Image (spheres, rainbow, N blue to C red):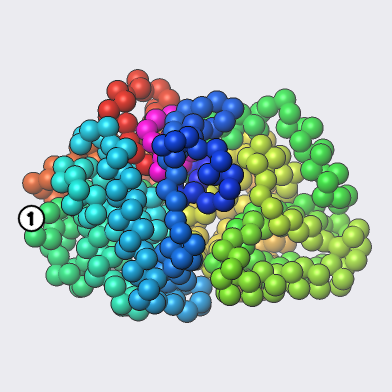
Amino acid sequence: MAVALDALMRERGGVWIAHGSGNADRDMVDANDRIMVPPDSPSYPLRRLWLTEEEANRYYEGFANEGLWPLCHEAHVRPVFRAPDWAAYQRVNERFAAVIEQELPDASAPVFIQDYHLALVAPALRARCPGARTALFWHIPWPHPDRLRICPWRRELLSGLLANDLLAFQLERDRRNFIAAARDELGADVARSAVRIGGRVTAVQAVPIGVDYDRIQGFARGPALEADMQRLTAELHIETPYVGVGVDRLDYTKGIPERLEALDLLLQRRPDLRGRLTFVQIGVPSRSTIDSYIEMEQAIDRKVAEINQRYPESGGPIRYRKSALKIKRLVALFRLANFCVVSSLHDGMNLVAKEFVAAREDLDGVLVLSELAGAAQELHDALAINPYDAEGFADALEHAIDMPADERRRRMAAMRRIVAGSDVFDWASDILEGLDKLDPAALPPAPVRGATIRRRPAFRSRPRQPAGSRPVS
């Protein structure tokens, strides 16, 4: 998500306001807590907001990631809601609103708010700047109204989100769930694409996020690709004819244990693949002080060791790396792979699926994609799996390895048309231009989206806007 937002900011301009932590962040900012990014080609200022240790623990790890995250994901981890966490969440959202007020060039500048950490920013900002124009994108799933009732402060969250002029979700399912909750919990008047409560109307839309397709294409076509692929092959000790990849944050929603179970089952069924298949799992540590994440990471460590001991040929089938790859090397890894596995137990979108497709300029490779990831609603030519069905999952992996070349090309070409036709700039355009066009006196209709998505000009082809009209993100 950060990669997608960085691409947007490079093209659109504005100020990105974000939490800062650690000595390096503090050392690099100026007297106004700003730093120009990216360092090699400065495009926009990043404004840091500093949190105390208690605020970070209660606002971020507590309410946001022990409460809202499991509430919104059907991954069988019990949400934890604590009053001190809720108090910190409210306080930090107020602080973000105060910094946004400082950074606004004028009341007409759009404010683009990102994700579930900042659900209460809009009402706090509106109290300070009544004319502020805000859009919030909720990147993760929105739960069914019955599940939402687990949250003691659901009405406050709903009211906070409805203080935005435009509210966007990844999928139509999430949009419907939110509108149903607003009606049931707040008694709001609802239409297909808007909610009215009191005299205020909020447009509510489904706008699935895309990737920076052209940038990925640049790496996929670049002269360094072959050398990067060779370096990764040597670093990861890949000596087998078949290579699979998985790239994830170490999160219990990503279905990594289920993925390893399916790989184990495949190797039990197909002894001929032992010593001929390498699976590269990139696991980026995340929220590593939360018990559920610690336990999951330990379980993955044990399972990887167990599989590598059971099938010792060629050093074992799993190459497990606990660190992120820069996008250039990630593209090279995707191009090494015969197949990529996205096995989410529940996901708003999962951009890894779209990044893999964007990287396959060669029209090769197979995407094995969970039906429970938002990307499955768009990428119908992936091999669909239910991550809870180990036998079916193993069947899909076997199909991915044995798939004929003409079928691989047909499937990949179809998915690439979808990914190219709705990239990160189209996503941002839908939201920011939708915000510009809102009629506060009417319930706006939802945009019509068909199965065929035509590529529209991205921001790069439009004239730059005056500084006063650029968004604060």
Measured along the vertical axis of the image, is residue 59 above or below residue 306?
A: above
Residue 400 placement (x, y as % from top left): 69, 56
Measured along the vertical axis of the image, is residue 231 above or below residue 124?
A: above
Quarter the C terminus occupies: top left
Residue 409 placement (x, y as % from top left): 64, 42
Q: Is residue 7 magenta?
A: yes
Q: Which residues are magenta?
A: 5-17
- The dominant secondary structure in magenta is helix
Q: Evaluate whether residue 111 shows in this view.
A: no
Residue 295 placement (x, y as % from top left): 64, 75
Is 117 placed left or right of 126 in the picture?
right
Residue at mark 1: 199
Q: Is residue 455 magenta?
A: no
Residue 179 placement (x, y as % from top left): 24, 63
Is 46 placed left or right of 230 in the picture?
left
Category of crowding for the residue at label 1, using alpha-carbon neighbours closer than 10 angstroms: few (below 14), some (14–19), many (at least 20):
few
Measured along the vertical axis of the image, is residue 144 above or below residue 173?
A: below
- Viewer-side residue, 30 vs 241: 30
Secondary element type, mark 1: loop
Is 334 placed left or right of 80 in the picture?
right
Badge 1 amino acid: Gly
User: Please, which residue is most extreme toward the front here?
Assistant: 31
Q: Evaluate whether residue 32 shows in this view.
A: yes
Tell me which residue sits at (32%, 37%) in the image.
Answer: 103
Measured along the vertical axis of the image, is residue 46 above or below residue 130?
A: above
